Image (cartoon, rainbow, N blue to C red):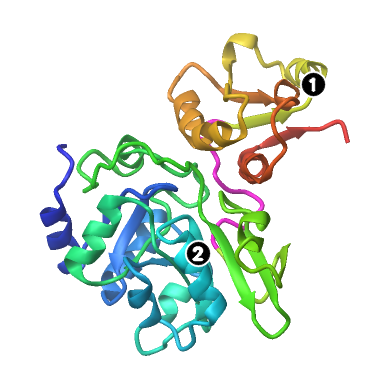
Amino acid sequence: MTAISIKQAAQILNQSGNIGFPTETVYGLAARIDMPIALENIFKIKNRPYFDPLIVHVSSLAMAELLVTDMPLEAKILAHNFWPGPLTMILPKNENIISSLITSGSPYVGIRCPDHLLALEIISEINCPLAAPSANPFKATSPTQRQHVENYFGEHFPVLDGGNSEVGIESTIIKINSKEKIIEILRVGQIGEEDIKKHLEDYQVVVKKNDLIAVPGELEEHYRPRIPLIVTETNNLLNEFLLSHKIKIEEISELNLPVNSVLFMRNLYQELHHCSKDINKKWIFINLQKYQSINQDHFYQASLERLFKAASVKLLSK
């Protein structure tokens, strides 16, 4: 199917439909925030549980301010410096606009402004924010190109084609505690602790799991490719596993990624999709020993977080 145009995408969304659309992080499965049927269909299409909230995408800070009851100064500072971009902020929602279906019953909503011209264009065209998780079945590897979305949902599923996602993994999610001057990173992504600290020097920035607020992608099993992934640290551990499970060498495919933290992150999902295409392969593996020289920065750590959740088998020496 030929990729849909902005005009076609707007028509589908305005008629309570759903589309796949590109962002700089991954492709999203979108619905207007004011169309309950379309929001419900997101969960049905993905087979997504209702406890997993949706992130709302806006085209400007002004649009975001309409969705919340409070936009603290810190949020405005971060929006000024990182929007459009891969930063999602958890803020108190305006219940007259944001339904409990979007937030899984929480009084908070995750909002971000994507750094992709087509994403911003479609939001501006319909003049309405879009609720959008990644455009894949629940727990599957996130899509970073149109073809991945069509592989999941069929070639006739409407998708805006924006090329390959530049970032390659999901956005950083943060929550602001103005009173205690703490910024909690609830999901790691391209934007790290030091990036945020540069603009809020008086604040403590911590990576934290917040049990009171559910955030997308935080289950232990997530981002999983079509065939099981083995993450190992040595060839010996891998060989022992293959031997004990009677797995032949020709049945496994190696996940090869650049030895550069930014490119490692950008190519992670892309290569997981690529390795899953070979119908003759039954396993994928990656040996982290190969990446010992890589810069151990937050780009790499964010990628490892996804990689370990994507893994069906972890063969670690520690």
Residue 165, how many percent across, how many down?
40, 41
Residue where numbered disc 1 is placed: 234
The Cα atoms of the two marked residues, 2 and 1, are separated by 36 Å
The residue most toward the right is: 318
Residue 2 vs residue 251, the one in the foreground = 2
Residue 40, how many percent across, how many down?
34, 69
Please name the residue shown 71% across and 20% down the image: 290
Query: Would residue 244 be counted in the magenta stretch?
Result: no
Question: Which element type, helix, strand or loop, lies under badge 2?
Answer: strand
Q: Kindly report the secondary structure that dominates the magenta region of the rendered protein.
A: loop
Q: Quadrant of residue 60?
A: bottom left
Is any part of residue 292 visible from this angle?
yes
User: Counting other residues with Cα less than 10 Å from the Cα at mark 1, is it few (<14), some (14-19), or many (20 or more)?
Assistant: some
Q: Residue 185, relative to residue 4: is it above or below?
A: below
The disc placed on residue 34 is: none
Question: Which element type, helix, strand or loop, lies under badge 1?
Answer: loop
Q: Quadrant of residue 187?
A: bottom right
